[in-house]
Amino acid sequence: MAQRETVTNINSGSEVAGHGFDFDLFVIGGGSGGVRASRMSASYGAKVALVELPYDPVSSETRGGLGGTCVLRGCVPKKILVYGSAFSHEFQDAKGFGWEINGEIKFNWEKLIANKTKEIERLNGVYKRMLLGAGVTLLEGFGRIVDEHTVEVKESDGQVKTFTTNHILVATGSMAVRLNIPGKELAITSDEGLSLKKFPSKVVIIGGGYIAVEFAGIYSGMGAEVHLIYRKEYPLTGFDIEARKIVARNLEARGVIIHPETNIVKIEEHYLGLKATSDKKEEFHVDQVMFATGRKPKTSNINLEGVGVELDKAGAIKVNAYSQSNVPSIWAVGDVTNRINLTPVALMEGTCFAKTVFLKEPTKPDHTNVAHAVFCQPPLSSVGLTEEEASARENADSLRVYTSTFNPMKNTVSGRQEKTFMKLVVENSSDKVVGALMVGPDAPEIIQGLAIALKCGATKAQFDATVGIHPTAAEEFVTMRSLTRHVYPGGAVEDGQ
């Protein structure tokens, strides 16, 4: 999508063309992007209101909560469950280090979920206090745009109130989608998967993206029989192909039963629970079926098209480089724009919006070299371009690719058969490192540091000149000297040895 490079009709006062407004900014959505934009705008002197649905761990058309997907039903609770599931592997590995673990080790799902819910309720309260402390007016209910300067709020008690505003920011995020197959209403999504009252002993997870892979590791690590079913040959479409193959092997090594190139076509109730049938005529009798088949922008029912805001085919709000829609007073940040759907990106976009509109400093969010992490076990993390992306660029230079595969030191004693994989993609003429990835313990923590290096345009020579920290896995990134392969424009590959 081509982005318009100009910002039009920015006014920071409470009056424009002789019209008085209740607010300078009205934000619809209290997730990461909306909260950041609200707080920053208020700190720059704007009079700000924010509307969000009443809190609930599981989202719906009528329930939400301050903190949004990340805090309430995404990154935070997911990472808590990842931590919880990882202990089973730690108990196994501990034996090689001399720990004699005798007797039955029990896992209490209800206790974990209660502690998880307690934490997200605490964070929901933190967000509320931060906004009130910043001077933002908080409204609980459903926000709907009436016209380019008017928002209608239907409160929890059914009352409808109308407010005028100079600028409207839509930050309603995204929602999990279900495949349109018979019995889809019997399945859950990741929302419900983080808050199940009873732990499922057998699960089918439909999808091969990061949410599917992460939940497969969570449930399997806690003792469930997990069937991961996806359409492609390998999971995690869009990531580096070598990394995808390794993740698939690691899933199997940790007990997940994978079913590539397979589709679930029907879900039915069964006396054993649920029955999911595949296009290969396989039948899975399980306690739960989870859709992890992507997310879509939450743009329905708020009258965007009614006021002339352009949406793309996915229902995302089309915005220019400054997050402004085609209606000058209406802006959007975060997942609702379907640019890069990550919490830190929404935070960046919210900050840039506030600077652009209320500091009069037009600031574009920079979506280059954004690091990604998949909290599978062990995790995958990357920054920059994949090898495939780098070689497919217009007027692409030839590439040098460096890889390293090794057994982590911990595994040499624990006996776990699980290799760490690292890769650097280097542009030949400039010597710049344009991509880095890792599959292995602590990958996200390590790649975060490399993201700074790539942002600064670091070269392979500078990587090589950096002294490593020994003994660590991270030092391998600054000691990769042997070239794995050359990749030439057009796809030709030459072995580096």
Image (cartoon, rainbow, N blue to C red):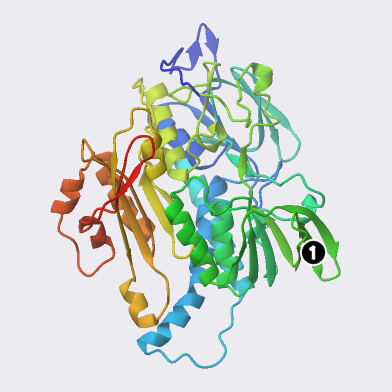
Q: Quadrant of residue 407?
A: bottom left
The quarter of the image holding the C terminus is bottom left
Q: In this rendered view, identify the residue nearer to me: 268 or 100.
A: 268
- For mark 1, what is the residue? 274
Q: Quadrant of residue 140?
A: top right
Residue 181 at x, y percent in the picture: 78, 47
107 versus 169 height, above or below? below
Residue pictured at 36% horizontal, 20% vertical: 360
432 versus 445 height, above or below? above
Residue 278 at x, y percent in the picture: 75, 57
Residue pictured at 60% horizontal, 17% vertical: 148
Q: Is residue 101 visible?
A: yes
- Residue sticking out furthest to the top: 17
Residue 329 at x, y percent in the picture: 53, 18
Q: Secondary structure at mark 1?
A: strand
Q: In this rendered view, identify the residue nearer to me: 456 or 107.
A: 456
- Amino acid type at mark 1: Leu
Residue pictured at 60% horizontal, 26% vertical: 312
